[in-house]
């Protein structure tokens, strides 16, 4: 199975043929097992899109369930590939997640402040440079 368009996204460019292999193996597995439901983690977003497209395009009678990402204690998404990270790479990966969480909190606080404000004009709005500054601040502090 050759999924059109997946070799041009960033992950597909650095892993030529990866999505073709995923589509082929998952299709074979579905045909052999014939599951009612199949569960995939949302951390592999492109793979989830591919599998949903595969089941739709081939009229496979499988309910594809995308599940929330489960994280390690340090915030790193659980994955068998984590075993390939050295100590420094693992620490850096966890900091990236922390910085994104910090930016999300900043954004949610801005939304909350805007919702409780009687006038939108008086609200200090958050912009992309504010979020970037917050992310960089966390990255630099770790």
Image (cartoon, grey):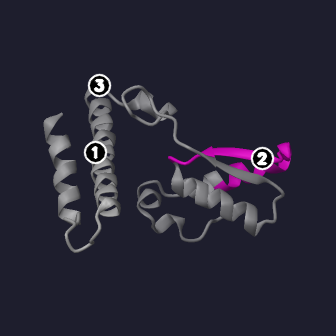
Q: Nearer the viewer, mark 1 or mark 2?
A: 1
Quick check: 54 above or below 35? below
Is residue 57 magenta-colored?
no
The residue under label 1 is 102
Q: Is residue 135 left or right of residue 90?
A: left
User: Which residue in the rendered view is the most extreme toward the front?
Assistant: 118
Q: What SS does tag 1 mark?
A: helix
Whichever of callouts 1 and 2 sits on the residue coming sooner in the sequence is 2
Instruction: Kindly identify the residue that appears in the image at 38 percent across and 33 percent down.
Output: 75
Find the distance from the CA under tag 1 to the CA under tag 3.
Answer: 23 Å
Q: Which is more toward the observer, 64 or 47?
A: 64
User: Which residue in the rendered view is the most extreme toward the bottom?
Assistant: 121
The residue under label 2 is 37
Quick check: 70 above or below 41? above
The image position of residue 39, as x and y in percent, is 68, 44
Is residue 25 magenta-colored?
yes
Residue 76 falls in image quadrant? top left
Q: Is residue 68 left or right of residue 73?
A: right
Disc 1 to disc 3: CB gap under 8 Å: no
Instruction: Kindly identify the residue that appears in the image at 46 percent across and 54 percent down.
Output: 15
The image position of residue 17, as x and y in percent, is 54, 57
Q: Which is more toward the observer, 6 or 117?
A: 117
Q: Is residue 53 left or right of residue 31?
A: left
Instruction: Kindly identify the residue that appears in the image at 57 percent across and 57 percent down.
Output: 19
Instruction: Kindly identify the residue that appears in the image at 85 percent across and 47 percent down.
Output: 34
Q: Which residues are magenta?
A: 23-43
Q: The C terminus is located in which quarter?
A: top left
Whichever of callouts 1 and 3 sits on the residue coming sooner in the sequence is 3
The residue under label 3 is 87
């Amino acid at each position: 199975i050759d999924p059109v368009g997946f070799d041009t996204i960033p992950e597909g460019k650095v892993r030529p043929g990866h999505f073709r292999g995923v589509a082929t193996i998952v299709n074979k597995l579905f045909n052999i097992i014939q599951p009612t439901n199949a569960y995939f983690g949302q951390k592999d977003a492109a793979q989830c899109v591919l599998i949903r497209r595969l089941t739709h395009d081939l009229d496979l009678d499988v309910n594809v369930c995308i599940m929330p990402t489960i994280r390690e204690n340090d915030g790193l998404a659980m994955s068998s590939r984590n075993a390939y990270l050295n100590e420094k790479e693992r620490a850096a990966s966890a900091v990236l997640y922390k910085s994104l969480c910090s930016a999300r909190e900043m954004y949610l606080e801005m939304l909350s402040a805007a919702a409780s404000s009687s006038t939108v004009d008086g609200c200090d709005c958050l912009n992309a440079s504010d979020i970037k500054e917050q992310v960089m601040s966390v990255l630099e502090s770790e």
